Amino acid sequence: MTEVRDAAISFEARKIGLKKAQTRKGTDVILTLAVHPDEVPPDLWDTWVGQRYQVAMVALSDQDEPEPGPDAKDGARAVKIAGALCRNERFWKWVGVVDEDLAIKWVYAHLGINSRTDLRTHEKARAAFFKMYDRFVDAYKTGKA
C-alpha cells in the first residue's frame, strides 16, 4: 500500500471562497483556492475533474511559519489539561476514584473517547471536557473538590 506522504502533492494556495451548495448527494461545501501558476503540480493538471483527494492544510503566518487555528489550539489545550487533571488528587475525589489510572478511565468513559489525543479532533468530546473541567474548577474554588 502506498504511503500518503509518498503520494501527496504539495502547493501553496490562498482561500478565496467557501460556500454551501446542493448536489445530488446532498449539501456539499465548495472550497475555492487560488494557486499561482508556477505552484500548480503537474499531477493536478492531469487528473480529471471529480478526482477525490485526501487534503491536509496548514495555515501560514506572514513569516511562512505554520500557524495552528483556534480548533487546533483548543485541542492541544484540552489534551494538556486532561493529563494534568487526571494526576490531581482533588479531581480523583471529585469523580469518586482513588488513583490516576481510574481517573483516566473515568474521563474516557465520561467523554466517550479512547485516548486523550481524541480531544484534538472530536469537537463534541472536547466541548464536554471543557464543560466538565469548568464544573470541577467551580467545585475546587468553593472547596467542594
Image (cartoon, grey):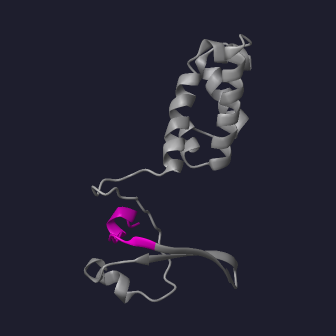
Where is 79 relative to 54, above or below?
above
Give me the residue at 35% from left, 63% from top: 5
When asked about the image quadrant of residue 39, the answer is: bottom left
* The residue positioned farthest toward the front in the image shown: 62
Give me the residue at 32% from left, 66% from top: 6
Q: How many marks?
A: 0
> In the image, residue 16 lies at what x, y percent?
46, 75
**Is 30 left, or right, of 137 in this rendering?**
left
> In the image, residue 11 lies at what x, y percent?
32, 71
Say if the magenta span includes residue 9. Answer: yes
Where is 26 relative to 6, above or below?
below
Where is 20 relative to 141, above or below?
below
Magenta highlight range: 1-15
> In the image, residue 18 lies at what x, y percent?
55, 73
When asked about the image quadrant of residue 37, the answer is: bottom left
Give me the residue at 71% from left, 10% from top: 143
**Is 13 left, or right, of 49 in this rendering?**
left
